[in-house]
Image (cartoon, rainbow, N blue to C red):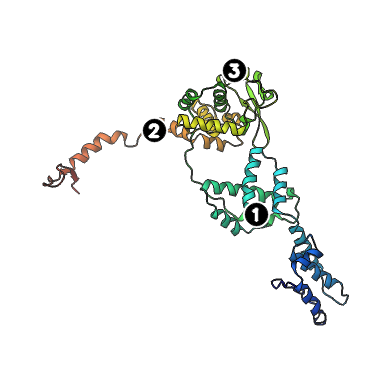
Amino acid sequence: MKVASTHKIIIPQGASNNRAQNSEGEWSLIRLLSETELKRLFPESTPEQARAKLVLRELKTHPQNKVDLTPFDNLLGETLQLSSVTANEALEKFLAFSQIADSTRRFYRILLSKALPSLGLMPSPDEIVKFRDSLKCKPGGKSSYHRSLRAFYNWLYSPSSGYTQFKAEGNPIRFVKTPKVPKRKMPSQDKKTIKTLFACVDNIRDAAIIAVLIDTGGRRAEISNIRLSDILWDQHSIRAIAKGNREVLMPLGPVSEKLLKQWLAEFDPGDDLVWGINQSGIVSMLRRLEKKSGIKCNAHTFRRGFASELRRNGVDILDIMKLGHWQSMSMVQHYTESVDYENSQTRYHAPTGGLVDQTCRSLKEQMVPRPRIELGTRRFSVYCSTD
């Protein structure tokens, strides 16, 4: 018989010495039960849970035992309830009931499927930080893992999850700081790059996709999922499902509307996607275009270009937020940082502007020639300060 020496049965405080002495053989038998035997007795429990059940059963079967078993019983019940929920089950429930876009759902599934097997449902804050720091990815990638874990644990430890054993005060992500990501200027399209991209395309479909991307400012998923019934010609708009599972309208410009009509005159999508390709097909097309043109070309560069061009044309930030269906003006400001700098630069006057000539003359008057350097060295004269 296999001896599980690592598991110890602890008799609750208050049990009589006679009870412990008379049942020594019974406690030893529980200690000596193998995992196979425990599995046969309690198929749905782990070895630790099975031993706890046997201890509780043994304590309850003897009337002379005067120990209050209520705390022990409650603890066992909570343990069994916690262990009945697996990380995979909780993840599937989170993805099924969260009001998020399909692209965000796929994003969470990929990252959380890698993180939860290591962290589980009840990690400590230190374990989360240690896992995040061990990732071999850039700071932006670590930030993405943190955002995914934050969304999952905030849901798990809230009443909306339906798991009453996870209390809000025990949420470990509350005590983990969000990692800082270096802020860099992100690439975006402008009129010059759009003109170059149009010159590189060789078919009406690709030209129409480029025009719709820059004129609507739509995200990749929103543009790729357009169907014929979503195009509102009379309103010069396209209906789409945005982040947060929100229905929005995206504006169509004259060029994008014209090219879209030309494409639909050649291709009849029926009830399917208007482009005849899915999201992956659009990604592949943009990668080919980037390689051919030498211009950074993904769907989000067009979204940044959309916001930046509207800002250059004097459109108010609130209007840009509504047209691009952002949920805060701070995001619009983030997308148009380069434009704000350009506008500020046009109004810039150097503080030393009126002092340049005077300063140069005064400095030259204070300088004296340095003696000429002898043979074997550089043959020129330089100025040095009298100080």
In this view, 282 is above or below 51 = above
Q: Earlier in the sequence, mark 2 or mark 3?
A: 3
Residue at x 80% of width, y 82% of height: 21
Lateral position of residue 191 relative to residue 209, left or right: left
Quadrant of the image containing the N terminus: bottom right
Residue type marked 3: Gln
Q: Where is residue 349 in the image (x, y as percent from the top left)?
A: 36, 33
Q: According to the image, label 2 marks what residue?
A: 348
Lateral position of residue 117 relative to residue 306, left or right: right
Q: According to the image, label 1 marks what residue?
A: 117
Q: What element carries label 1?
A: helix
Q: Which of marks 2 and 1 is nearer the N terminus?
A: 1
Q: According to the image, label 3 marks what residue?
A: 262
Q: Quick one: which residue is furthest to the left in this view?
A: 375
Q: Quadrant of residue 134?
A: bottom right
Residue at x 47% of width, y 32% of height: 291
